[in-house]
Each structure stands twice: as C-alpha cells, then as structure tokens.
Image: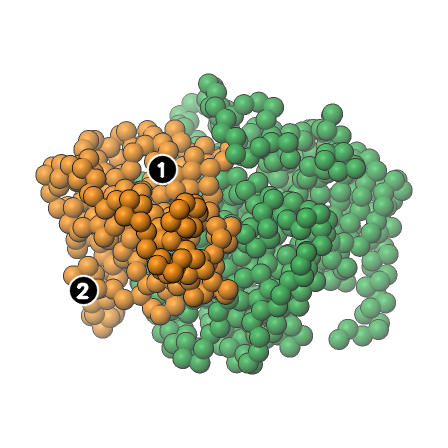
Amino acid sequence: MLRILVDALRTGVVTIRYPAAPSVPPERFRGAPVLSPGSHLPPPDVCPAGALSERVDTGGRHVVLDLARCIFCGRCAEAPWAGAIAMGRDFELAARRRADLRLEVVADDASGRLPEAMAPTLDPDVEAAQAAAEIHRVLGRSLHLRHLDAGSCNACDWELSALLNPVYDVRRLGIDFVASPRHADGVVVTGPVTRNLETAVRRTIEAVPEPRVVIAVGACAASGGIVGESYASAGGVDRVLPVDVYIPGCPPRPEAILFGILVAVGRLEARR
Amino acid sequence: MRSCGAQRRSSLVERALVQSLLASAGGDAEAEPGPRSTDLTLRLGNSSDLLAAAAVLLSQHAMALATVVATDETATQNGDMEVRYIFEPAGPGAGVAAIPTDRFVTLLVAVDPACPEVPSLARAIPAANWHEREVQDLFGIVPVGHPDPRPLVVHDGWPPGVFPLRKSFDASRRLPVLAADEFPHLVAEGEGVFEIPVGPIHAGIIEPGHFRFTSVGESVLYLDARLFYTHRGLEKRMEGLSPLDAFYVAERICGVCSVAHGLGYCEALEQIAGAAVPPRARLLRSIALELERLYNHIGDIGNVCAGAAFHYGTAIGLRLRERLQQLNERLTGHRFLRGLVIPGGTRLDLTHDLLGVLAATLDETRAGLASLMARIEANSSVVDRFDDTGILPHQAALDLAVAGVAARASGVDRDARRDHPHGALADPDAPSFEVVTDTGGDVMARVTVRAREADVSIRLVGELVRRLEPGPLQVALVDPLPGGRIGISAIESPRGEAVHWLRLDERGRVDRYHLRSPSYQNWPAVALAAETAIVPDFPLVNKSFELCYSCTDR
C-alpha cells in the first residue's frame, strides 16, 4: 500500500488541461483535409469511403468532401493530388447538422470561388439551437452519458474509454459515463447501427428520459462510414433516430470526442 | 538453408501425406499444390469422404482446423458452390515435427446448389462448429449432422431462404425484420437453477454480445454466448472493390487489430501479385505489429485489474496504454496505427528522430509494466482472484483450436510469428524471440503470459529497429492483378493467429475475402472457462481472454 502511495506521488499529475489549454496533435496527425479551390482536385472514386463527390454546373466542377464520411486515411492527399488536398491538423470538427460537415469547393477553375448562391449555408439551425438551449436549461453544464455500441469496430469505443483514463479524466469537467440509460442525460453512439442491433439501439435511446442528447461518434455512426448501407447496416445513427451532434473521425481522437460532447451540452460553439 | 537430407525427409513426408489423404477418399480425389507452392489442396470427388480425410489430417499428421471458406461459383463454368476446409499443423508441441509448420492443407468439396449439403465435421472437430453455422447462414449450405444448427450470424427476423454471401444477393438490399419467436438459448433446467440474461448492451464501454448464464447459487452451470450483433457484412462489402479500396475496409474490421488485419490482407494480396515487399517496409510492418501487441497487452492487464476491483492497477494500465497510443499517433499520425501499412509496403517511414522517441517510450513502458506486475503479485487479494479462476484445460484448448494468449496460457505452444512467419520475421536473418507459454490455464496465467510477451515485444522492436537499412518503402503491384488466384496469410495479432483468405476475380477485383480472427476461435473457450467460475468472476474471466466482438462478427 505504501509503495502504491509513493508511486502515485512520484508520478504526479498526468491529466491534460484541454479544453482550457489547446491540444496540438503531432506533426503526422491526419485531421480535416484542406481542399484548395481552383486546383486539380481528385475524382470521387479516389476516396475509399465515398466521402468525395462532385457535380458540374455553370460555375465549373464542384468537389464536395463529406467530413462525416471521411476516414482520414490521407489517400486523396497523396500523389498525384498532393497539391490539391492537404491533410490538415484540425480535429475539432463536431457539428450540430450533417450538412455543416460538407466542404464544397470549385475545382479546375482559376477563380476557385463558389458562386454566391452555391455557398454552403452558414445560418445556425434554429431547431438545433433551440434544442441546445433546452438541454442547457434542463441539464445545466454537467452531462451523464450512456455509451451505446451500434456495431463499431471498437476503435471509437476505446477512445471513449480513454476519456476516463488519468490523462483525459473527463469527470473533471462534470461529464461521466453511467451504466443505465435511465440514469443518463444522453447517449454517445458508435458504429453504423447494424441490423442485429437496431432494436437494442432504439430501446436504449428510448429508455433515456427526455430531453436527451444523441451524439454520433465517428464516421460509422455519423454517416455509415466505410461500412456504408447494406443488408447488415443502416448506414448511420440518423437513419434510425435523430442525432444532435456529429463527431467526425475514424476514430476521433479523445480530445475531438470531448470537443463534441462540450458542443452538445452548449459549453463550446461548433466551428461549422 | 535446409540440408539435402532434410529436403528428402520432407518430400517423403509430403508423399505420405498425399497418399494417406488419397486413400481416405478411396482414390476419388485430386491433389495439387496451392494456394502457395508449399501448400496442398485436395479436391474431394465425394463430399462424403470429408470426415475420413479430416480425420487423417488430425490423427496422423497432427493438424488443426484453421478456417472454413465457402465460395459461390454458380456464375462460373462449374456452376456450383465450394467449401474449403483449411488445416494447419497444430504446433510443434503437438507431435509430428517433420511437417514444416508454415503450410496449409485445404480439403475442397463442391456443393450442388440444388441440394446444398455437406457432412458436418463439428462432432469430430469442435473447432468446426461455428464455421459450419456461419456457412449455413450466409450461403445456405447445410452441415448435415451438426449438433447445434441454430442460426449464428443472422439474428431474429431474418427472412428464411435469403443468403447474403451468395453472388445473386444484392448487398445493398435492406430486408424487413420479420416477426420472430424468442431465440432458443441453450439453458440448464432444474430445482434452484436460475437463468441470467446479460446484454447485448452492457453497462460499461464495451462491445455488444448476449450472455445467457444458467447458475445454481453463484456457480455458473452453463453459458450460452450469442454474438454477431456487430455483423456489418464487411466480407460482402469488399466484394467487387478494387484491391486497394478493399484494403481500407480490411484495416477497419477491428480497431485494436488494425495493423494485424491490414497486414494480413496485404500479405495475401501481395502473394497473388507476386510482389516482393522491400526489406525496410517489412521491418516497419513488424515493428508496427509489435507496437499493436504492446498497447493491447498492457491495456488488457489494466482491464483485468478492473475485473478484480484493483483500481490502482487499472489506472496504471490505462496510463501506460495511453502513452503507447500517443506514441502511435506521433509515429504514424494515428492512435491505432492505421495508415502505416499499405498494399506493396508502407506509406510512412520512421525517421531517426521518431526512432529515438520510440526507444525512450519503450524503456519507460518496460519499467512501468514491471512495476505494475510487481504491485499485482504483491497484492494477495488480487492474486486470490486471479489464481485458479476461469481455467481453460489444455485438451480443450487443443480441441477448440484456440489461438494466441489463451492457447499459450494453457500450454499450447503456437505463435503465428514463428509458425507462419510474416513481415520481417520471414527473413532468413530474422531476430529470434521466445514464444511464452504457461500451464496454469487460469486468469493469472493469461495475465503473466501477456506481461512476459510485452517484454518480448519490446526487445523484438529493438532488434527490428537495429536491422533497419535505408531503402525503398513500397513496390508497385502488377496491373492488372491476376484473376482467379488465391492468397492466404496468417498473422499473429494481439489476440492470436488471424487467417486471411483472398481471391480476385477476372477483372482483378475482390471476388471473395474471408477473415478467421483469433477471437472467432476463442469465444467458445470463454464459455467453457466461465463454467469453472462463479457469476461475479465472469467479467474477470472474460477480460482475461480479451476477445474482439468486431473481428468475430465482421
């Protein structure tokens, strides 16, 4: 016992201060891809997850990157498209609306700017804002969440459990994970909602008292990700039940999940 | 280099193997090398000879069932379906040593789609049980005489007569959930016998599965585990994709086995392409594989402590794991090491600076792990919970063809890094390493095997780093890739041997991919070990096996 105490004192505090202090990911970290307008952006089939799409109109070829689908593999930023797309280091990507995760630029055009009418709308979603205000009013600034694995590969689950380790220690922020949906203010869902879990997912979420938040963690939960939609997969949580916050990533790093949870509870503003 | 004498001996063994197999089939069979030149495939004329041929492999040649792969050939000239039962040597401790361990023997039977039946091996080979049920669910091929033919992969409400892995099934179809009776769980009955249902949604942050315990008082009488809740249809998802696109799916079958599964897929693909991966890339791949083993093993030791309410141990395990995952992110940009391995080699190099960070972190990890194990061993209440809990007997581990830590902790000397060398360990001057075994078969044995293996991994990484020479990281794969050829690989993932089977179609796209994960083999062993425990010890027993649901369910 004494040895344990001595060890603990010698180790000292290992907990980080994020979000009070910024978290800087290492150099090789692959965050949100940055698309350079007006460059030779890759064709959609380069993306193994189907996150890239394009449409052609009078303004030229528009390339759209869906961050909710992106698996951050970096393939679109490799030769021969390395100049057109670069992997950025931004990981604070959580958004209240799926549409806010779509980045659109005009490719192969010197001006590279989107026509005014085509610019993605940045108006805050009224309903989402109301929901956030209501959650904030009822739940205050603390949040107890229930984790729900809806068919994930376990990577997002591990990052959620990492939030409880001494380094992230999410409880210092008044956030905790509880054992029963009936004790929870909301759920964090990982995985694309498999056919074999759909009933369990619905029942668990419905067991959470209202108002409740539903947070989709990772590409599979946010959009189906690399799993997509099939005989075995619904293709994302919002195909089954409404989602309040989407957290992109494959998996999102722990700070990215923390950012999304704080967006959900109204303590941080989504950047998108 | 092997001597001429050894070669002659092995060709004699080879001839004896082929002859005994042909005799078991009454001569009605064709033998040919394949998938690799060192492997053997025996196409049986009559599926009724399957049992006899399998018995020859098990009893006379000390082999074990590695995997079962079904394919739908109805669109080809043959117009049938095929089932491949793939065997491998059960390990050097299991007897006949003259057969080289790195070989697969495939028994192939053709199945008439009009009457899709094969004789079941499950009574004779318990390890075949789940494989046959999976083939029944996904291909509609009935294992006649199976002791437990309940559905495995498809759950309640799946329309009867629909088989998603047949080529005629459109993968994008979403089928209605039909009304269904309650699943027929296997339970014991009697006075004072209770049934305890747990899951699929659990109280902690863990993967979904349903456990139906029957207990008398605290003792577990029987455990029926129902899995495949996370079945995402990934094998079907990969069909028709270009081999590169399919790689990203393979890398994401499981989060915590990303390197192992990505590498297994790549090695199978590179075999088909006939590609020679450059030495530096092979070393980097092996380093990544050991880093994956390390963060898993150390995190797992911490998690087992949670099962015994030793929270100090849990916190230390989590902290050491976090340190390793931060190292992963620094080395590869990803906390689960995704993005390093790529078909043909590696995407990234490890620079001199990064190798320095790697060495320093591993030194710290070694010290941290030694201290954690010392605290565990000095704590009598923890030792009391670990000792003699959840025993997997040696013979059961052999019968179920259990893999990885679970096998080695029950005295089964198997490790795919040695038995099916891969990555840089396939090189002639590869560093040697100890395969750690224990005979206890209990929670304590599995914990200590993990700790000792983590130590071996740290040493092995040092050896691999020392062998790094400047050189290319990738080789281009031939384009187009040859259709019809099969690639097979076996990788020692943190949980044990994973067997990958890949075949491309005529256009060079994925025709069929199958993964047999070590967790798939080991789940039935968890149920068996739980029956020696009390209900409150189940989390401890389960965590000591630390199996993946996602690799099992795919």
> Do the residues under discs 1 and 2 have CB atoms within 8 angstroms?
no
Tell me the element at label 2: loop
Quadrant of residue B107 within the rendered picture: top right
Tell me the element at label 1: helix
Quadrant containing the N terminus of chain A in the rendered view: bottom left
Residue B54 image position (x, y, % from top left): 75, 43
Q: Is residue B180 above or below residue B80?
A: above
Residue indicated by mark 2: A21
Q: Does residue A135 appear anywhere in the picture?
A: no
Residue B294 image position (x, y, % from top left): 44, 64
Indicate the colour of chain A.
Answer: orange
Side of B431 where B495 appears, left or right: left
Residue A237 shows which numbered tag? 1
Chain bearing tag 1 is A
Residue B282 image position (x, y, % from top left): 58, 70
Task: Name the residue nearer the viewer: B441 or B44.
Answer: B44
Chain bearing tag 2 is A
Which residue is depicted at the point 19% across and 59% down?
A19
Which residue is depicted at the point 27% across and 42% down?
A97
Quadrant of residue A82 within the rendered picture: bottom left
Q: Is residue B467 above or below residue B215?
A: below
Residue B87 shows which numbered tag? none
Task: Name the residue nearer the viewer: B296 or B453.
Answer: B296
Side of A213 where B87 appears, left or right: right
- First in sequence: mark 1 vs mark 2: 2
Residue type at mark 1: give it.
Answer: Val
Residue type at mark 2: give it.
Answer: Ala
Q: Residues within 10 Å of mark 1 (few under 14, many from 20)?
A: many
**Colour green, chain:** B
Which residue is depicted at the point 84% across and 38% down?
B45
Q: Does residue A108 appear anywhere in the picture?
A: yes
